[in-house]
Image (cartoon, grey):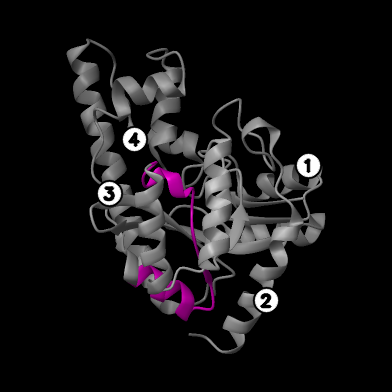
Amino acid sequence: MIDLHLHSNCSDGMLTPERLVLLAHQANLSTIALCDHDTIAGVESAVQAGLSHGVEVVPGVELSVCYKEFTDVHLLGYWINTDALQLKRRLNEFAARREMRNREIILLVNERLQEEGKELLTVSEVEALAGGVMGRPHIARALQLRGYVSGIEDAFSRYLVPCDVPKIYWPMEEALTTIQQIGGIAVLAHPTSMTRDKQLLGELISELRILGLDGIEVYNNMAAEHEITFLQGLAHRLKLIPTGGSDFHGISPDDCIGKGRGGMRFSDALLPPLRKLAAKRQTTPD
């Protein structure tokens, strides 16, 4: 079994890349993909840990993308060349903006805490919880440890959603081109997060296929059973590669590496078409 969508504390996950690989090994997964948000900082550590535990680690990334009126669309890149300078330069821009954004969020959260007569959070305590790249889940955890909220969901609903600061996004065309130019495979993550209108989603994915999309994450935690069936048919009709992953962050007690909604597992039968395209692209990049 496999899991092609995992996050570490190099973005907004709670576990180190090494710990993720260990969990994958314990779950008897043969192949995983580390796809942190807009960063490849944990890939090398994960790959090395994979060699130690007998787990194949696919170098990946999850880019924050915009397309038409849709923002915060997530595009997965698999088998990317993590040494590519064009990717590193762009991700460095995102890292600088992300750090600024998280500090701005803490300031806004503190304004609300001050209004409530509560002690303010400090950047250092949130950074300590992150153990890597600070993200909103770490701010939520800090609020929980202070006793201000009952849990992560409570922290988001009461503080982090109202105090959110806009992200920056890659234009879809640029993101697709970049992934393919560095030998990678571009896959739309949890497609129904764009829209649950099936007709509209089908039209959007058809357009993205023309722009260069290689696959869609058919098997994912956000999709209901009937939506997965729809995505299966869409992938077949548009000749897109189907993939699957848990989108594991290690935050919720319900998070389970290697499993999706209802205990769904991700078959290694999904791998051959991905490997074939990756081998072709890395030999003769687009």
Question: Which sits earlier in the primary sequence, circle 2 or circle 1?
Answer: 1
Q: Secondary structure at mark 3?
A: loop
Q: How far apart are the two marked residues, 2 and 4, measured between alpha carbons?
A: 45 Å
| Amino acid type for the residue under numbered disc 1 | Ala
Relative to 20, say whether 252 is above or below: above
Residue marked by disc 3: 167
| Amino acid type for the residue under numbered disc 3 | Lys
| Amino acid type for the residue under numbered disc 2 | Lys
Q: How far apart are the two marked residues, 4 and 1, measured between alpha carbons?
A: 35 Å
Can residue 186 be found in the magenta stretch?
yes
Q: Are marks 2 and 1 in contact (CB under 8 Å)?
A: no
Residue marked by disc 2: 276
| Amino acid type for the residue under numbered disc 4 | Val
Q: Secondary structure at mark 4?
A: helix
- The boundaries of the magenta stretch are 174-196
* Residue 44 screen position, x and y as percent: 61, 63
- The answer to whether any part of residue 7 appears in the image is no
Relative to 134, say whether 60 is above or below: below
- Residue 174 picture quarter: bottom left
Q: Are marks 4 and 3 in contact (CB under 8 Å)?
A: no
Question: Which sits earlier in the primary sequence, circle 3 or circle 1?
Answer: 1
Question: Which sits earlier in the primary sequence, circle 4 or circle 3?
Answer: 4
* Residue 98 screen position, x and y as percent: 32, 50
As drawn, the label of residue 27 is 1
* Residue 219 screen position, x and y as percent: 60, 47
Question: Which sits earlier in the primary sequence, circle 2 or circle 4?
Answer: 4
Q: Residues within 10 Å of mark 2 (few under 14, many from 20)?
A: few
Q: Residues within 10 Å of mark 3 (few under 14, many from 20)?
A: some
Q: Residues within 10 Å of mark 1 (few under 14, many from 20)?
A: some
As drawn, the label of residue 209 is none
Q: Residue at x 27, y 49 (%)?
A: 167
